[in-house]
Image (cartoon, rainbow, N blue to C red):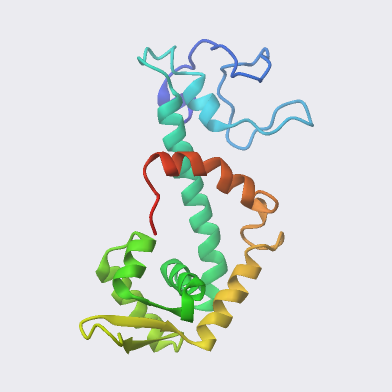
Amino acid sequence: MHQDLDGPAAPAAAPLPGRPASPDEGRPVPSGARPATPDAPPADPLETGIHDRWDGQGLPGQPWPFMAICSVGRLYQLIKKALDEELEPRGLSRTGFFLLTTLALTSGGRARLSTLGRFLMLHPTSVKLTVDQLEADGLVSRNRHPRDRRATLVVITPSGRDLAGRVNVALESPDGPLGRLAGLHRPLFESLQPARLAFGDLEI
């Protein structure tokens, strides 16, 4: 948020828990600006743009729900962009990557279309279109279910398993598009897990 677009900055608010107050507390920080202390982390735009302005702009309630939603949404967009940079040179979409890795984790490397849609939280049409593309690229095949003639099984091919493996190894590289998350993968998962489970994400 920019001061020239959003009006004057709000008066300084109380510092966040565990963060000492500073003379500049509550003032908006220009994009790309860093604090004067060299060892301090860069200013968070959600703190300067939302938390430090909330009371001064007369908004009721607490800023944390809006900040939490913005934080997750912004992180998702940043990770999505970085993941696309990793996948596009390999001719793979995000959904294709998720689907291949999911298949590689199943017993026998196969699953029903409906199972894939449920696990990935995708509409059946999106799953079908993705499988069509992966099949055309030789990364999956389709088989009839041996006991349910109405069901189709999607089976990962050796090429598909190899590609999924190479991509997942590449995601760990500190030099890749997702290198900023190096060392943060497990902490990130564990920090989001309570919120995800609170919404009832308990089934695969």
Residue under the point 40% across and 50% down: 202
User: Quadrant of residue 173 in the image?
Assistant: bottom right
Measured as percent of width and height from the top left, residue 68 is found at 46, 33
Residue under the point 44% across and 13% down: 55
Residue under the point 61% across and 16% down: 25
Residue under the point 79% across and 31% down: 38
Q: Residue furthest front?
A: 147
Residue closer to the observer: 88 or 98: 98
Residue closer to the observer: 191 or 112: 112
Whether 94 is drawn above or below 189: the answer is below
Q: Is residue 87 left or right of residue 36?
A: left
Q: Residue furthest left?
A: 150
User: Quadrant of residue 138 in the image?
Assistant: bottom left
Residue closer to the observer: 196 or 35: 196
Measured as percent of width and height from the top left, residue 111 is found at 38, 76
Whether 151 is drawn above or below 74: the answer is below
Whether 84 is drawn above or below 28: the answer is below
Q: Can you say which quadrant of the picture contains the C terminus? A: bottom left
What is the total number of numbered labels drawn onto the structure image? 0
Whether 79 is drawn above or below 197: the answer is below
Measured as percent of width and height from the top left, residue 160 is found at 51, 82
Q: Is residue 87 left or right of residue 61?
A: right
Measured as percent of width and height from the top left, residue 80 is found at 49, 57
